[in-house]
Image (cartoon, coloured by chain):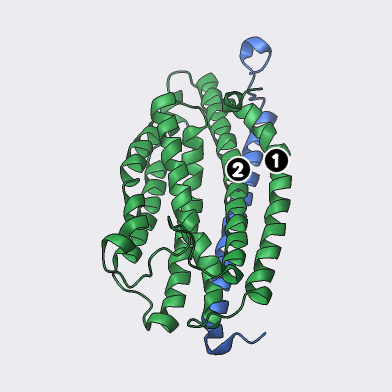
Chain colours: A blue, B green
Amino acid sequence: MDLGPHAGFILASYGLCLLTVLVLIAWIRIDKAGQEKALRELAEQGVSRRRPEDGGR
Amino acid sequence: MAFWDYANPTRFLKLVQVVLPWLTGLCVVAFAAGLYMSFFVAPEDYQQGQTVRIMYIHVPAAWLSMMCYSIMAVSSLGTLVWKHPLADVSAKTAAPIGAAFTFMALVTGSLWGKPMWGTYWVWDARLTSVLVLLIMYLGLMTLWRTMDDPIKAGKAAAVLTLAGALNLPVIKFSVDWWNTLHQPASVMRLDGPTIHPDILWPLLVMAVAFTLLFFVLHLMAMRNEILRRRVRTLRLRAASAAHPRSAVATAQPAE
């Protein structure tokens, strides 16, 4: 389709929005992976959410 | 189970696990429909020509920038008044998403302004108040990062968020209260929208898609924040077990 003489402005707008959303999604996914890794490492060290009286550390 | 029961983070995480895939699917469908309507169904505007297509992302991004701050303000009330366990998790995680939508609204508005107004930027009331909103989001994000204790940070941020909510009516009514280059409201008006349905419908579908995107990202970010607080608690507990006296001083911060 022909976006006319201002095609650059239209494509730049959509491109920048797409990039912003992709950066947000990537940041959230990387953050999630980091937190899950930290929880796994703590579990491997025997540190759990259960209280000592429940049998955890 | 009552709605209030989801104040329990574990129950909330289970709910997120069930809801998120459906919400993501709906979001993708809404964007597919919205983008198709925006580019292949909606006609050119008689004045703006093809640049009207920028409006299909600019307007929803601007709406979301305000909706996100409104959610933060309600969450802040939840933190200060009801001490809801998830309230400041919600407020904290909404800030970067709100900043991103505000950034999108400002950039797309600028890119629309150059061909239509002849300039990327003017210091008119609407543009300036939205820029203030972006600065407030960034300030709140900084505040949360400067304090180690998430509870204390949440309370301080809640007070600042509620004070900053005064900017929302200024943004909304700036085009009525002052002479601005930015056009007045054309959708949310007491006498109904002034936009032709051929342009209004794609705009509304894109607004739904943006709203779904916000909720998907917000739920994902809230889940991360709950995990981050669990990690912090466990590290404090481990440090406390290893060095009972110096645990608090040496424990790593939440972020």
**Residue B9, can we see it?**
yes
B43 is higher (above) or lower (below) than A22: below
Q: Nearer the viewer, mark 1 or mark 2?
A: 1
Q: Which residue is mark 1?
A: B19
Give the secondary structure at mark 1. Answer: helix
Where residue A48 appears, as percent x and y from the top left, is 65, 24
Q: Give whichever of B117, B242 is nearer the camera.
A: B117
In this figure, what is the number of numbered marks? 2
Q: Amino acid at mark 1?
A: Val
Q: Amino acid at mark 2?
A: Leu
**Are the residues tagged 1 and 2 within 8 Å (C-beta)?**
yes
The residue that appears at 42% across and 81% down in the rendered structure is B116
The residue that appears at 71% across and 52% down in the rendered structure is B26
Q: Residues within 10 Å of mark 2 (few under 14, many from 20)?
A: many
Where residue B23 appears, as percent x and y from the top left, is 69, 47
Q: Which mark is residue B189?
A: none
Where residue B241 appears, as percent x and y from the top left, is 54, 19
Q: Quadrant of residue B125?
A: bottom left
Q: Quadrant of residue A35?
A: top right
The residue that appears at 44% across and 58% down in the rendered structure is B191
Q: Residues within 10 Å of mark 1 (few under 14, many from 20)?
A: few
Residue at the left extreme, as displayed? B178
Q: Which residue is mark 2?
A: B219
Distance, label 1 to label 2, CA atoms, is 9 Å
